[in-house]
Amino acid sequence: MTTRSAGRRRARRRGRLPLVLAVPALIGLAFLVVPLAGLLVRAPWSTLADQLFSEEVGQALLLSVVCASLATLVCLVLGVPLAWLLARGDLPGRGVLRALVTVPLVLPPVVGGVALLLVLGRRGIIGQHLDAWFGISLPFTTAGVVIAEAFVAMPFLVIAVEGALRGADPRYEEAAATLGASRWLTFRRVTLPAIAPGVVAGTVLCWARALGEFGATITFAGNFPGKTTTMPLAVYLALETDPGAAIVLSIVLLLLSVTVLVSLRDRWISSPA
Amino acid sequence: MTLYADLVVARDTGFRLAAHLTIEPGQVVALLGPNGAGKTTALRALAGLVPLTDGTVRLDDDSWDAPPGVFVPTEHRPVGVVFQDYLLFNHMTALDNVAFGLRARGTDRATARTAARQWLDKVGLGDHALTKPRALSGGQAQRVALARALATDPRLLLLDEPLAALDASTRVHIRAELGRHLADYPGHTLLVTHDPLDAMVLADHLVIIEHGEIVQQGPPAQVARQPRTDYVAQLVGLNLYRGTARDNVVTLDDASGGGELTVAEPATGQVHVAFPPTAVSLHPRPPAGGPRNSWPVTVVHVEQHAHTVRVRLDGMPPVLADVTPATVAELHLSPGTPLWAGVKATETTTYPS
């Protein structure tokens, strides 16, 4: 008796949400969900299969997945050591360094693209030497897409891995040292397994961000179908010529995003503890 | 083959460790002291996890640390460490944990695994080779940690509160087992602990450290008989006083609480006087006759131990007494009760301070 009435009272208390909060909350929810639903409503379901397997979509999708994966690989190879340096390195001005690393996170991607052009463009600070000495030109190439995506996505990985590293007990590394393990062996066999969940979460986020990259990519790599036209670029272009195709491409991206969310649900979204 | 350590470590916090240790092969030295005394800092300095500010660590002619020139990093020192909470690698099996040190030092996988298996058998955990640390009990984890530390055949074994994380019943058992392994171990052992029983049972030589400095050292039996500081006296359960002796009478220092004690052995100059709480008798009135010391005291605190009751008494000097529950009832002992304390001169030990 008592427990049930207590339960009901608790339920009523939880249900009594003030209107001042309830109304904007529902509007906010609708604001986030309705556009996505609209995408599904307006989808050209009859011709969906044809559109989905058309050459343009396939080409953009393949390019997107390949570039995002390569960019993620670059981020892993460079970002994990960078995260280690930020978390464990005994260097001055670590706070400033950490802030610098997160700049691309808040920077408008177009600005990132412009910055990349100024440095790696054919007349750029480094780019002119690459061109003159090695004949390498990065802008408006598939490699350029990878670079633009990595530039924008790396902070996601670095922040996730650094957080995991700072949460990991460094005394395990000391224990490994007393057993004769070098720092590199300790990192591979002790530290990395301990932070694996953080690395996986960071990698998935990084990949998702790279996949959706638009601003820096179109600025630095331009729009050449089959070479630099990734899915987001294709969506934007198709919107003017073939809205149906734009919707199909968008749905594909939406599905990919939801898959990423679901795969991360346990590790990232719902476990602050 | 002696390990010689002159440890000086200064911290930014103002804490300073300055301790001189020598450990012979096969010897177990216990470093005993209260929390924050610098025990763990000393152990970490020997392991190379903390660099010395000054001084030296060397094993025979191999210098491990001698600022400013020499510092051998931890991974190149032939040490084995058992940490207080063991720090077993949770993603590896017990076997891989024990094999880790051998693999890190260049042994091939098959040989390392065979040796690790032998070590697990030796500590009685042959059946748990493929168990992950989280599935081991506290006692089992401790034994894996010991096997892991010993598997690399270190010249110096460092034990940091190796029994502190165990519950009381497991502790007795694991302590005896650890004692057997230490007896078999030919290298140098340093045991850091704040438990006097661990130190007395496991070590050949006690070094007592307070506020970063060594205050007393010697064989366990001697330290237990003749404590030199209040901390040590408390550890070994003795009443301890300092004073000036003239023949059989010791005038106690004010710091010891004042008063006079008649002792069995005549002495002169500065001395320590010690006697066990069981030597103290309590009386409602001044006791008559016999060569005993007696002085008025007041009960401060009454505490039940296993079969005796420990009574803390204030007076000149203050004293601890162990009495039977029957005495407590007879004398109606409670805080504030005025009494007379009596100690026979023959129960006291006097030694120069």
Image (cartoon, rainbow, N blue to C red):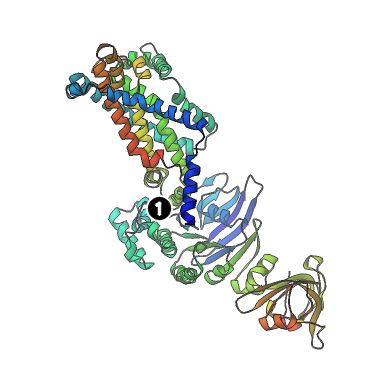
Q: Mark 1 falls on what kind of element?
A: loop
Residue B87 position, x and y percent, is 45, 54
Q: Residue furthest bottom?
A: B289
Instruction: Depth check: give the residue in front, B157 or B256.
Output: B256
As drawn, A155 above or below B141:
above
State whether residue A163 appears in this view.
Answer: yes
* For residue A179, side relative to residue A136 (left or right): right
Q: Amino acid at mark 1?
A: Phe
At a point 23% along the width and 25% down the height, the residue shown is A62
Instruction: Depth check: give the residue in front, B232 or A202.
Output: A202
Instruction: Depth check: give the residue in front, B230 or B155.
Output: B230
As drawn, A64 above or below B76:
above
Residue A239 position, x and y percent, is 29, 15
Residue B153 position, x and y percent, is 41, 60
Q: Residues within 10 Å of mark 1 (few under 14, many from 20)?
A: many
On the image, which quarter does residue A117 sit in? top left
Residue B125 position, x and y percent, is 36, 65
Q: Which quadrant is the C terminus of chain B positioned in?
A: bottom right
Instruction: Depth check: give the residue in front, A19 or B141.
Output: A19
On the image, which quarter does residue A64 sit in? top left
Q: Chain of mark 1?
A: B
At a point 46% along the width and 36% down the height, the residue shown is A85
The residue wearing badge 1 is: B89
* For residue A210, side relative to residue A56 (left or right): right
State whether residue A82 appears in this view.
Answer: no
